[in-house]
Image (cartoon, rainbow, N blue to C red):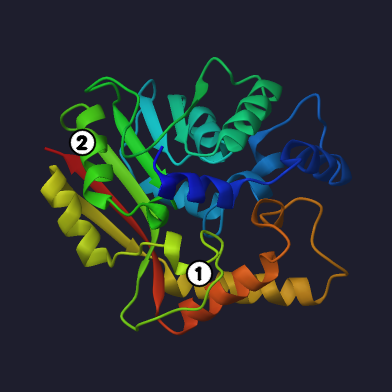
């Protein structure tokens, strides 16, 4: 991996993550011997609004039963496991973070999904897969850390079969300039590489994809964070299970900065669904 990729992986490394998740599950009353995807939903889908937007994105994407799906930037495997259960698919997850991959494998094993979900440590700009290996692809909140976006989408074009759908869900650059760091995906702008939806569409087109659907979730996300913060203000502290387990000691600052950037139109979470020519 490159120096940049190592810095990104370091950003996502959280010591003792598996134990924190297990403790959170126990405190939330989950049955650790019969874990379900919904038990882990508060923590294992590391993107804006979590399970809500996972299901929204999947509704927009023509993924069929039995497909082999690539999830690039899979984190600890929440989207992959959701795909496996909701769409009865085989899913391969790829991520820069070795610790995320290890936790993804453990949680998947605990849910009895190891036959349908596997996880690989590696780079999304140099994918360790043969050409035309997958029937579809997804990538949720990964591209913000990828500087060479052309190569990223080019790698997707290489490993997907012709006609395959690709669902991208990322935080994209909004119409207003600037934003304040840290945010959930980066401590500083040194590892943050946002593109606008127009720039992303053009890059996908250059890689061989035709964008067929766009869903801008800025207004939805503003409401989501307002409700989340209002609920948090009434509680005594964070819930036992949540994205704060993945974002470190300054989690509150990161999410506040994210919400403020949404309000200021500096960023906008966008789902793009494309088809490989």
- Where does residue 205 sit, x and y in percent of width and height? 13, 50
Q: Is residue 88 above or below residue 40?
A: above
In percent of the image, x 45 and y 26: which residue is there?
A: 91
In percent of the image, x 83 and y 32: which residue is there?
A: 31
Q: Quadrant of the C terminus?
A: top left
Q: In this view, does 1 lie above or below 264?
A: above
Q: Is residue 84 above or below residue 242?
A: above
Q: Look at the numbered disc 2 and give the secondary structure of its residue.
A: helix
Q: Which mark is residue 157?
A: 2
- Where does residue 150 sit, x and y in percent of width and height? 21, 49
Q: Residue 221 carries which label?
A: 1
Badge count: 2
Image-quadrant location for residue 239: bottom right
Q: In which quarter of the image is the N terminus?
A: top left
Mark 1 to mark 2 CA distance (whole Å)? 30 Å
- Where does residue 34 sit, x and y in percent of width and height? 76, 26
Q: Look at the numbered disc 1 and give the secondary structure of its residue.
A: helix
Residues 145 and 165: in front is 145
- Kindly tell me whether residue 89 is visible in this rendering: no
- Where does residue 168 sit, x and y in percent of width and height? 34, 49
């Amino acid at each position: 991996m490159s120096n940049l990729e190592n810095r990104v992986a370091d950003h996502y490394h959280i010591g003792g993550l598996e134990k924190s998740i297990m403790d959170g599950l126990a405190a939330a009353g989950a049955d650790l011997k019969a874990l379900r995807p919904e038990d882990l939903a508060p923590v294992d889908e590391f993107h804006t609004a979590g399970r809500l937007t996972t299901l929204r994105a999947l509704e927009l994407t023509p993924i069929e039963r039995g497909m082999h799906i690539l999830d690039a930037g899979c984190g600890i495997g929440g989207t992959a496991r959701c795909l496996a259960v909701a769409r009865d698919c085989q899913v391969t997850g790829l991520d820069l973070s070795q610790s995320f991959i290890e936790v993804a494998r453990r949680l998947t094993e605990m849910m009895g999904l190891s036959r349908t979900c596997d996880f690989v440590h590696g780079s999304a700009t140099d994918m360790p897969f043969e050409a035309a290996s997958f029937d579809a692809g997804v990538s949720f909140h990964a591209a913000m850390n990828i500087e060479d976006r052309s190569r990223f989408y080019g790698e997707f074009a290489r490993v997907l079969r012709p006609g395959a759908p690709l669902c991208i869900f990322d935080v994209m650059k909004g119409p207003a300039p600037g934003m304040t760091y840290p945010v959930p995906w980066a401590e500083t702008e040194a590892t943050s590489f946002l593109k606008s939806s127009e720039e992303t569409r053009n890059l996908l087109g250059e890689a061989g994809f035709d964008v067929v659907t766009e869903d801008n979730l800025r207004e939805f996300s503003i409401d989501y964070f307002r409700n989340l913060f209002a609920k948090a203000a009434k509680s005594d502290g964070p819930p036992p299970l949540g994205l704060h387990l993945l974002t470190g000691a300054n989690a509150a600052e990161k999410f506040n900065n994210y919400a403020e950037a949404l309000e200021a139109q500096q960023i906008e979470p966008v789902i793009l669904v494309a088809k490989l020519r």
